[in-house]
Image: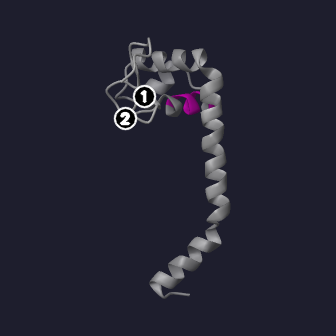
Amino acid sequence: MPDTGYRHIAIGDDSVPLIAGTTTKVVEIIQDHLAHSWDGYEIRRQYPSLTLGQIHSALAYYYDHREELDQDIERRRERVADLQTRHSSSDIRDRLRTVTGKP
């Protein structure tokens, strides 16, 4: 894995920054930070398996690579919106009715 220069951040095989030694993506921490205005201590309460050092490294990595990660977050939002549009709840209900045989 490429060295990121951040002690607790690694780049995964899919080029996604992760908390080193975990499967937690930096973008997951950042989305919680941005959406809920959580500081490092609140993030620590929500992710008890992470250390404050790991969390602060994720925050530092984000602020040093903000444009790139903001673009990633936007791509993820667009993908979710597209999936929601293509698979509306009525489509899912229709499929469940077909599978279960219930009206």
Point 55% across, 28% down: residue: 30
- Tag 2, which secondary structure? loop
**Marks 2 & 1, CB-CB < 8 Å contact:** yes
Residue 23 badge: 2
Q: Quadrant of residue 47?
A: top left
- Tag 1, which secondary structure? strand
Q: Residue furthest left?
A: 21
Question: In the rendered view, would you say 98 is above or below 79?
Answer: below
Is 31 left, or right, of 1 in this rendering? right
Q: Position of residue 84 (x, y in %)?
A: 64, 59
Point 31% across, 26% down: residue: 21
State the extent of the magenta-drawn residues as a range: 29-35
Q: Position of residue 102 (x, y in %)?
A: 51, 87
Report crowding for label 2: few under 14, some 14 to 19, many 20 or more residues within 10 A (C-alpha).
few
Reading the image, the residue beneath label 1 is 18
Q: Nearer the viewer, residue 52 or 86?
A: 86
Q: Position of residue 31 (x, y in %)?
A: 57, 33
